[in-house]
Image (tube, grey):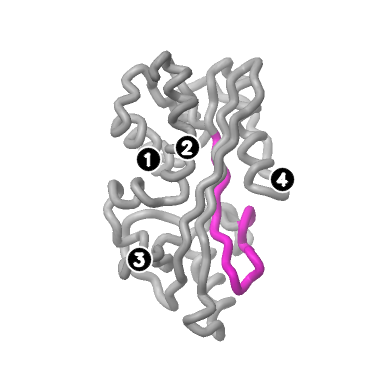
Amino acid sequence: MRVLLASRNAKKLGELRRIVAAERLDGIEVLGLDEVPEFPEAPETGATFEENAIAKAVDAAAATGLPSIADDSGIAVDALNGMPGVLSARWSGKHGDDLGNLELLLGQLGDVPDERRGAAFVAVVALAVPGAEPVVVRGEWRGTLLRAMRGANGFGYDPIFVPEGETRTSAEMTPAEKDADSHRGRALRLLLPHLRALAGQR
């Protein structure tokens, strides 16, 4: 069974493939957008993570005929009333500018005391199968935000995010450690029963 991850992000693709392998879902082959014929991708205009994830998954399933998974994820900062939220990837004005996004967020939090620097990574993952209602799951990963970047693993806001119960940032954790606890890892594991059903497993 081929399942499409509607993303061109190699790190997200690697994460899903690692989780599928770790759960021994041998009947599932995960493809990325670069491995299927190109189709028009709608811009992320939803007001919520759920809206964006569902739209991407449904579009991909309709265009390819494959069961399709899409996620929308970001960071919700307590002191900013849950922002950047759905704008996380383009917080500094340009989509995917990780350093610019980080520097802007650090600047905005410059006067916020340590005890008020709480945040949560949020991931909403949708699975769309042609002819069926989408399945939507949500994972959250609470932590606090540092005042300077640490670590070279991960991407996005990982270098300033210290998960609850940790002293390291998520950019200092190994991929396996991050998979076990991350917001996307948590959401993807909630999706596993549906993937097992697709693959004919119990």
Mark 2 or 1, closer to the camera: 2
Q: Is residue 138 above or below residue 26?
A: below
Marks 2/1 in contact by CB < 8 Å: the verdict is no
Q: Earlier in the sequence, mark 1 or mark 3?
A: 1
Q: Quadrant of residue 138?
A: top right
Gap between marks 2 and 3 measured at Cα: 22 Å
Q: Which badge, 2 or 1, is on the more N-terminal residue?
A: 1
Looking at the rendered image, the quarter that the C terminus falls into is top left
Residue 12 vertical placement versus 163 (above, below) = above
Label 2 CA crowd tier, 10 Å (few <14, some 14–19, many 20+)? some
Q: Which residue is mark 1?
A: 15
- Which stretch did the figure color magenta? 70-87
Q: Which circle marks residue 45 in the picture?
A: 4
Mark closer to the chain start, 4 or 2? 4
Q: Upstream in the sequence, badge 3 or badge 4?
A: 4
Dot 3 corresponds to which residue? Answer: 165
Does 73 lie within the magenta span? yes
Task: Specify the quadrant of the image occupied by residue 61.
Answer: top right
| Mark pair 2, 1: CA separation | 15 Å
Task: Say which of 163 and 8 sits in front.
Answer: 163
